[in-house]
Amino acid sequence: MTASLHNIKVLLGITGGIAAYKTPDLVRKLTQQGAEVRVVVTSSAKSFVSPLSLQAVSGNTVSDDLLDPMAEAAMGHIELAKWADVLLIAPATANFIAKLAHGMADDLLSTLCLATQAPVFIAPAMNQQMWQAQATVANMQTLSDRGVGVFGPAQGEQACGDVGPGRMLEPEELVNALSQNLIQPVLQGKKIVITAGPTREHLDPVRYITNYSSGKMGFALARAAHLMGAEVVLVSGPVNLPTPSVSKFHKVVTAQNMLDAVMGEISDSDIFIGCAAVADYRPVESVNHKIKKSNEEMSLSFVRNPDILANVAALENAPFTVGFAAETQNVSGYAKDKLERKKLNMIAANDVSKKDIGFNSDDNQLHVFWKDGDVLLDRADKLTLATQLLTLISEHYYDA
Ligand code: C5P
């Protein structure tokens, strides 16, 4: 997996927290990894770190003012936003996080965040109480829903004497996190179809059966694939998530709807990822009127739904096909069995019996299997895992 920053253009945004004193070292470590670094500071950051030091270590003038005609003439703010392959904001204060969450553009750095198409990563640093404040928690949720990557914060003793979460990660940890999370356009020109969320199978006009899938993993995959340059078609059952920017979004309800939407898109696709928790059965009949209660007991009959993943894998010109296996026991055994039985190229297994990962949680952990190998992707937020899984898929896709 990508682990270097060779030739990567990093725009480092520094905001006004005490951890800013570590940023000259961060710039040095980024450049040692091969990155080209330009630095933008907010006006309060200059109270904690000198622009002259940052200029010396980055080899570039440091920008701080949106309305400086000299700086605009050298490299204007839109040009700077386009120049960057990635934006890293370290340290990111509670105030800057709030500004970012609300799309404000009242200084150079916040304007750049709006004007760039590059992925944005933040390294929060603040007092532990401020980090846990409801407003910060809500702002962080907004940013994470929008695909902003988050590094840290770490736990420990703080500059103010408190102990708790809120310390900026150390420069070396930030450099590692950036190189592991940097999304390279390795899927440029590839069409990826992804299914996500649950399906609903109607019993009558007011009732249905479904499952606990939130759609978060499939949506994270769609977002990451889009950032990696792919043409993404997302086919999703009913979920409660903002629609990510993709080429096409099909909103479906039942397994049959999902199969139809997938089959309509699959013939010219390169990769298919079945991440949806498709209902295995549907009621034999869905009646047109509400079922009335009468007897003490009632029973329903179900028929098997089509297996979308297996249908795709069985196509004559099947795309590179990746399945998911949500299990509560013998995770790797069932996953390997599914890989073979459904004739998949790869399968990502997760243990949904663990309460803090999997269904409806923001984190996950995946054990990925292919014909002659496997890798464990350690617990992380779903966007990070999605990026790692897609990197793995792209490596095997190009090898196949
Ligand atoms: O066999 P099982 O349902 O456990 O397999 C899970 C995998 O198969 C997931 O990738 C899921 O999206 C896919 N699947 C499907 N259609 C079904 C059932 C499962 O595409 N009807």
Image (cartoon, grey):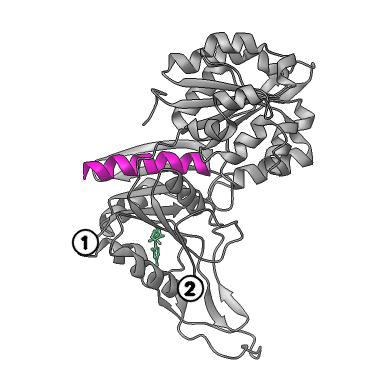
Asked whether disc 1 touches disc 2, contact meaning CB atoms under 8 Å apart, the reply is no
Please tell me in which quadrant of the rendered image residue 67 appears.
top right
Q: Residues within 10 Å of mark 1 (few under 14, many from 20)?
A: few
Q: Main secondary structure of the magenta part?
A: helix
Magenta stretch encompasses residue 12: no
Q: Residues within 10 Å of mark 2 (few under 14, many from 20)?
A: many
The number of numbered discs placed on residues in the rendered structure image is 2
Q: Is mark 1 within 8 Å of ligand 1?
A: no
User: Could you tell me residue 113's position as x and y percent?
Assistant: 61, 37
Q: What range is drawn magenta here?
A: 382-400
Q: Nearer the viewer, residue 22 or 83?
A: 83
User: Could you tell me residue 264's position as x and y percent?
Assistant: 35, 70
* Residue located beneath label 2 in the image: 254
User: Could you tell me residue 45's position as x and y percent?
Assistant: 71, 20
Distance, label 1 to label 2, CA atoms, is: 26 Å
* Residue located beneath label 1 in the image: 317
User: Could you tell me residue 357's position as x and y percent?
Assistant: 55, 45
Image point (22%, 41%), residue name: 399
